[in-house]
Image (tube, rainbow, N blue to C red):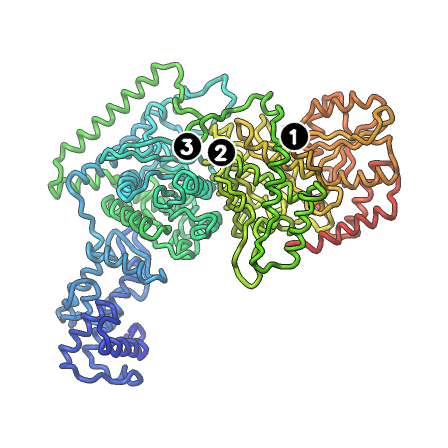
Amino acid sequence: MDRLNYINSGNAAYIDSLYEAYKNDSESVDYGWQKFFEGFDFGQGNAPQPAAANAAAGTPEHVLKEINVLNMINGYRSRGHLFTKTNPVRERRKYHPGKELETFGLSDADMDTVFNAGVEVGLGPAKLRDIRQLLEDTYCQSIGAEYKYIRNPIKTKWFEDRMESKRNKPSFTVEEKKRILNKLNQAVVFESFLGTKFLGQKRFSLEGGESLIPALDSVIEKGAQLGIEEFTIGMAHRGRLNVLTNIMGKTYKEIFAEFEGKNYDLETSFGGDVKYHLGYSTDVELSNGKKVHLSLCPNPSHLETVDPVVEGITRAKIDGKYNGDHDKIAPILIHGDASVAGQGIIYEVLQMEKLQGYKTGGTVHLVINNQIGFTTNFKDARSSTYCTDIAKTVLSPVFHVNGDDVEALVYTINLAMEYRQEFNEDVFIDILCYRRYGHNESDEPKFTQPVLYKAIEGHPNTREIYNEQLVKEGSINAEFTKGLDKAFRDELQGQLNEIKAQDRFTDTKPMFAGAWQGLHVPTKEEVYATSDTAISEEQFLEIGRKLTDLPTDKPLFKKIEKLFDDRRKMVNETRTFDWAMGELIAYGSLLKEGHPVRLSGEDVKRGTFSHRHAVVTLPDTDEEYTPMDTLGADAKFYIYNSLLSEYGVLGFEYGYALANPNALTIWEAQFGDFFNGAQIVVDQYLVSAETKWQRGNGLVMLLPHGFEGQGPEHSSARIERFMELCADSNIQAVNCTTPANFFHVLRRQLHRDFRKPLVVFTPKSLLRHPACVSKLEDFTQGKFQELIDDASVDTKNVKRVLFCSGKIYYELLEKQQADKRTDVAIVRVEQLYPTPKLEMEAIKEKYTNATEFFWVQEEPENMGAWPYMLRKFRKSPLQLEVISRKEAASTATGYSKQHASQQLYIISKAFEAPVSQEQKENVKKSADKMAETNAD
């Protein structure tokens, strides 16, 4: 038994050191230890204590027993969750060592011995029997608590004081119990009603986990008592219809209309989605008459993708609506056991919890633990003990609760909300329940889980269990629940009858409400209409001067001083501006107009290619200086270097833009190549949310793109992938060639009364290209140009027209000018989508003598914009041919010489003429220079 004894000389030495401190100053040790040593002194008659070095050998037996009891208390607190009664349909796995008395160096003979260690659990000196019973009640019943790994003793003490004083046993009034029963009744009867009235239709039933409904009802009430005014909720499809109706307040009539197909409008431009993916937003009235706002975010079937979106929505409202107060709004994320353990996005979202740019004041995580994936057993779904073990990476407390014990769950979720409001940190609740049917109602789960489903088949539902409990304790009589059941079924049947009598049902919730008031879905004409985005010369120069001023009383890096000197010359002397200045002044102008600007990404403060320097870090300190803050604008400039995440951060920024359409919200990839780590967000939200869920978004994505010899992972933002997703004016995709055009397209994003996502393929080498500049008048008199014609050629002399986009233009321009080719016109398509098709076709009409029209691109033939252009113009009068790299499986070569050869081939082919030695050297120089800034 010695091998299981936690006592050693180190423990005793530690106790001895505490005792020495107590003797010198009793207030220097915790209250519990004060009481322990008072009892010890009384028992010893103040006898002198042995030295620490001989503590183990010289400590009296009863003192060692006291320490053993303290070890037992710590053992229950640390490992009691392994021995709980939390699984409603399975025997729990066995863990060793267990919680037997012998594990802690104790025995049955000690059960009636009084130990001062009882002070530690609030009993005072108490029998071992009573101490152990308190620990059993608190840590080994329907609630398992994991919190001892938290490194802040204030937080662990907070839990112990609350849990042990109540023994984790709920104490609800009869009225509160009736409310819990009523919500359980709604959850159970609603599922039963759908199952009988819409037989065979998918609904992803909550059956087996119905206690979620009273838990959510209670946490909303509790949160409101603690000052919360709004909840943002994200969840997958299982149980969603139940949450929509019995928590969010969506009418049963609307749900029935969706089952009946009566919400479909033949004339709508929206494609719609299945009923268990839809979102909802409403104000609900609580029991005390107070109202709170609830938002359930729409979600795809891609599990957990909604999580960062919910966090982004919440943060946007914290920044805007609640002026930075995290205690006014709380996110609730409802996970599945298989997805919370298996989906990497969980980790990315958790790592945002305490980051300055992403924290939301703590999230309440609920896991509907069905103990199964689609058909995968939990033992095959994870290596960790619990599906929630990932929570420990950020030291979030975790509670495991028996889903059949609804009072325990309601008690726990209220405790979780108190913790969230007290410490503004995440907390997890693992609701161990089951799934009554298969993955969907028509699936047969016994094919793969025969033993489990045999147990589930004969298991009573949660309402039956709770009803029996309340009748037995005398809180209600047997007729009470029958009355609830009948009244609710009658209500459901009445609403179903109403729907059946209607030809169709129209959703009364407006698409554009709240923060979106005044915006609308644009017509095709509005999408192509010109926006006035110029600002006055006075405004432009004033912003430019303030952005180029540096503090004179602080030391700065010499390179930074030189950079800002060059920028000041642009403002005060040359009146010609590079890419960075065009971008920064665009942000500044929007701030001055009252629009917040938020920019995030892995290196955005400086910029991956060291061009932006929107934030200057002072040498020898961590102090930062942000020139944008000197503008005196009422709107705020938020700029954050993000964690190294694409999926999580893009989802977050999408959510942020969703909640605040009047802010310019931007995510920048380190290299455009890396955006595909977030492809799910692009596919399921960015390009399709408006047609599926009638939810617009104005998010801007900046994706560095360009072939400069940096290899397959630092060349392409995969233009072709975005182009194949373009339809119904769902997004905007641009590849600007001038700072002014970039300036205007950024401003255009907020100067129209509709919002569309904007994807910008941004430059790398052009950031410092001497020709890639714009004059002052281009900003103050111009507008965004979807297409830029060649102003340097005589129309009647042109025999060949080259359409292109982005960086390749400057290489073509260099060749055109070097060879004095007036017979070749270079036309820049700045907006790839919505495609300026009519303007491109007008180019053909303009150049009447031209016989050849080419699309020129750096990308391989099967990539870039060409596949889209080929499809778009296949029946057009403008018949295009392509000049590009040959089709390839990889985006770019990793060999610099091969890159240069390919690039020169494109230029030569475009003009049907050999390339000069000077241009060969320029291509090589560009590749060499960019290699120096490679993020790898």
Q: Give the alpha-carbon distance from disc 3 to disc 2, as whole Å.
A: 18 Å
Q: Position of residue 740 (x, y in %)?
A: 67, 36
Looking at the picture, does residue 335 appear above or below residue 293?
below
Q: Which residue corresponds to mark 1?
A: 783
Q: Residue at x 73, y 48 (%)?
A: 708
Give the class, few, some or many, for how many residues have Cα within 10 Å of label 2's Cα (few <14, many ≥20): many
- What residue is shown with label 2? 661
Residue in the image at 36% along x and 39% along y? 231
Q: Which amino acid type is shown beneath numbered disc 3?
A: Gly
Residue at which label 3 appears: 279
- Report the side of 660 relative to 97 (left or right): right
Front residue (pair 296, 193): 296
Labels 1 and 3 touching (C-beta < 8 A): no
Nearer to us: label 1 or label 3: 1
Mark closer to the chain start, 2 or 1: 2
* Amino acid on which disc 2 is placed: Pro
Q: Amino acid at mark 1?
A: Lys
In the displayed structure, would residue 442 be above or below residue 766?
above
